[in-house]
Amino acid sequence: MLSAKLGISPIAWWNDDDVNLSDDVSLEEALRQASVAGFVGMETGQRFPMNMEELGPIMSKYNIQVCGGWFSGDLLSGDLEVEKERVEEQLQFFKQAEAPCLVYGEVSGSVQSKREKTLSQKPVIDEAEMAIYGRKVSDFADYCEKQGMPLSFHHHMGAVIETQAELDLFMKHSSIPLLFDTGHMAFSGGDNLHVIDNHHKRISHVHTKDVRYPVMEKIDKSRESFLDAVVKGVFTVPGDGDIDFDAIFKRLASYQYEGWFVVEAEQDPKKANPLEYAKIGYEALNNGLTAAGYKIG
């Protein structure tokens, strides 16, 4: 039987890109609520101390482990050696935490955190530039892997790798493992099942973000920003949106994917109670993955 571990992102409680989309709960309270909902892992965020001496006892208190976390990469326009220096502290922290991976998110030129930039103003590169970028990211991933911490690449709305076509081209020119994010791929207009078919051998981490299609279809990417879409409620947890997760779980199972499934849904916690939505997300994952043949552990 395939094994799955269920985690959640702290973005349900506070948003690192927009402090207005955050509540006033402590890290400990967020961990407590995640545990109550049933999760055994949480990805890191801005309220996490960067050392296990401080963080470890808090995580252990709620039987939660670090199941990943974002690194803001700048390799599209930056220097490989500089990025190696920048990642060092977080890399060592993640090794101490025995995290499954470090999530690489490209922020160079990205509009994801810029309210003044529309989604249509995202960076776009040609195949020659993609080949150069893919090599740099692969070299960086190889370096981190040799240091004892694998990377997983996060395609993201507003970033250079957003659409299915961009992801296909990036995967062609790189060797880094893939973080497959259902919500970002759906919002970009991609087909989640086709992405799994095309890249299942490289998928090492899964973000289970749901999308409200009625909201998504009204987003004008030429006039609205990524954060505008978040505020309008384009994202939610599995079980509350319109993505067919049962089909996604079955497709992943057919390719023998095992590992973490992380609920990540940018919402306003003042409108979407984090504990309530964490429970909805956990139930949807638990039921859907069990039906697909996974053992939750």
Image (tube, helix red, strand yellow):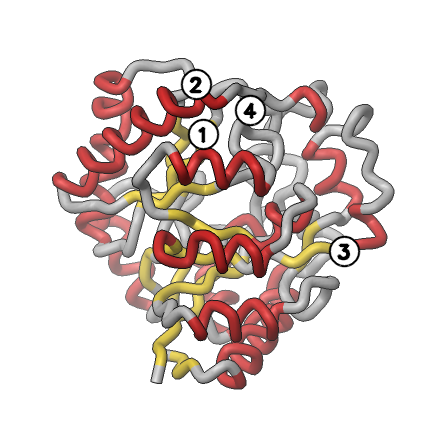
Q: Earlier in the sequence, mark 2 or mark 1?
A: 1
| Residue shown at 75% from the left, 41% from the top | 231
Front position in the image: 2 or 64: 2
Q: Looking at the picture, how far across and down is residue 77, in whole percent?
A: 41, 14
Q: How busy is the neighbourhood of tag 2: few (under 14 within 10 Å), some, or many (20 plus)? A: few
Mark 3, residue position? 212
- Tag of residue 106: 1
Q: Is residue 160 above or below residue 5?
A: above
Tell me whether the residue at label 3 lies in contact with that at label 2, contact meaning CB atoms closer than 8 angstroms. Answer: no
Q: Looking at the picture, how far across and down is residue 261, in whole percent?
A: 45, 64
**Label 2 vs label 1, nearer the camera:** 2
Q: CA distance from mark 4 to mark 1?
A: 7 Å
Mark 4, residue position? 110
Q: Earlier in the sequence, mark 1 or mark 3?
A: 1
Q: Is residue 96 rendered to the left or right of residue 234? A: left
Secondary structure type for disc 4: loop
- The residue type indicated by label 1 comes to Glu
Mark 2, residue position? 128
Q: CA distance from mark 4 to mark 2?
A: 19 Å
Q: How busy is the neighbourhood of tag 4: few (under 14 within 10 Å), some, or many (20 plus)? A: many
